[in-house]
Image (tube, grey):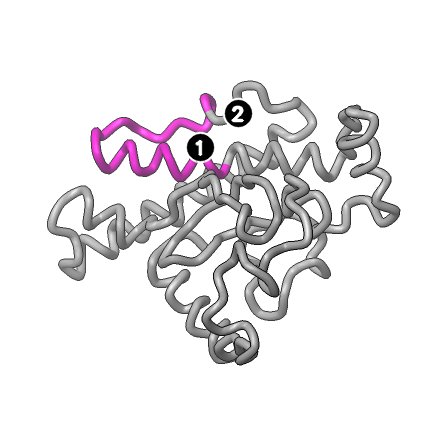
Amino acid sequence: MLTLREISSLVRRARIAFGQPEVSPEYRGWSFDSPPVKPPAYLGLSLSDFAYGYCPTGRNLYLKYVLKEQGQPSKPLAEGAALHSVLFRAVEDFKRFVYTGTPMDPGKALEGIPEEFRQRGEALYRYAATRLMGELSYVKAVGLSRGPDSAVWHAAPVAVQIPIDGFALGLGRAVVDGMALNAVVEFKFGPSKTWIGPWRDTRWP
């Protein structure tokens, strides 16, 4: 899910499936920093601290915020971080290629990646590169490209690693995987049961 056509299709399907969010009349007209909308406390928590269910007991929050200890990531988390790094680099390398002609190189994307994740990381990089290059060819063939900017916009509109300020919700600043079409884009590499319905990309193992 990297191209403009894919993201546009996903946003449309999400709107059909979930509809427009309803806002209760009692909350209309209120500012986020005034009751009843104002969060009860500004704890500085990150959304990822509690939204993804990595620690069912919540002890990770106690260690992080009370004892000030950073827990060791599990193997799935370490692999996910490595694959995210590779995918981010692939998107950036593709845009660099469009703007400057610099060839995409999986070798640089794999620098610093643990050996046990390198094979899957390289496969992911090559998969993303193939998808993006194919979309670039399509964009040029149908006349959607008027220059590097329009080519990148159609082929890879995702801006990766975007900081989001969660102050209005009582949260701290988070860094989301990407933003496109005013929507947050999150890439997941865990078991298929953790993905929602028809939006899993099954073309990459």
- Residue 96 located within the stretch drawn in magenta: yes
The numbered disc on residue 110 is: 2
Residue 40, position in %: x, y? 68, 53
The numbered disc on residue 89 is: 1
Residue 143, position in %: x, y? 14, 58
Residue at the extreme left of the image, as rendered: 146
Eyeballing the image, is 22 above or below 33? below
Q: Dot 2 surroundings within 10 Å: few (below 14), some, or many (20 or more)?
A: many
Residue 104, position in %: x, y? 35, 31
Which dot, 2 or 1, sits closer to the camera? 1
- Residue 104 located within the stretch drawn in magenta: yes
Look at label 2 and name its amino acid: Leu
Residue drawn at 38 percent across, 44 percent down = 159
The numbered disc on residue 77 is: none
Horizontal arrangement in the rendering, residue 186 relative to residue 71 (left or right): left
* Of 167 and 93, the residue lying toward us: 167
* Of 22 and 128, the residue lying toward us: 22
Q: Dot 1 surroundings within 10 Å: few (below 14), some, or many (20 or more)?
A: many
User: Mark 2 vs mark 1: which is more N-terminal?
Assistant: 1
- Say what secondary structure mark 2 lies in: loop
Eyeballing the image, is 146 above or below 95? below
Horizontal arrangement in the rendering, residue 68 relative to residue 89 (left or right): right
Residue drawn at 43 percent across, 41 percent down = 160
Q: CA distance from mark 2 to mark 1?
A: 9 Å
Horizontal arrangement in the rendering, residue 179 relative to residue 26 (left or right): left
Magenta segment: 87-108
Look at label 1 and name its amino acid: Arg
Eyeballing the image, is 166 above or below 123? below
Residue at the extreme top of the image, as rendered: 112
Q: How many marks?
A: 2
Residue drawn at 25 percent across, 56 percent down = 138
- Say what secondary structure mark 1 lies in: helix
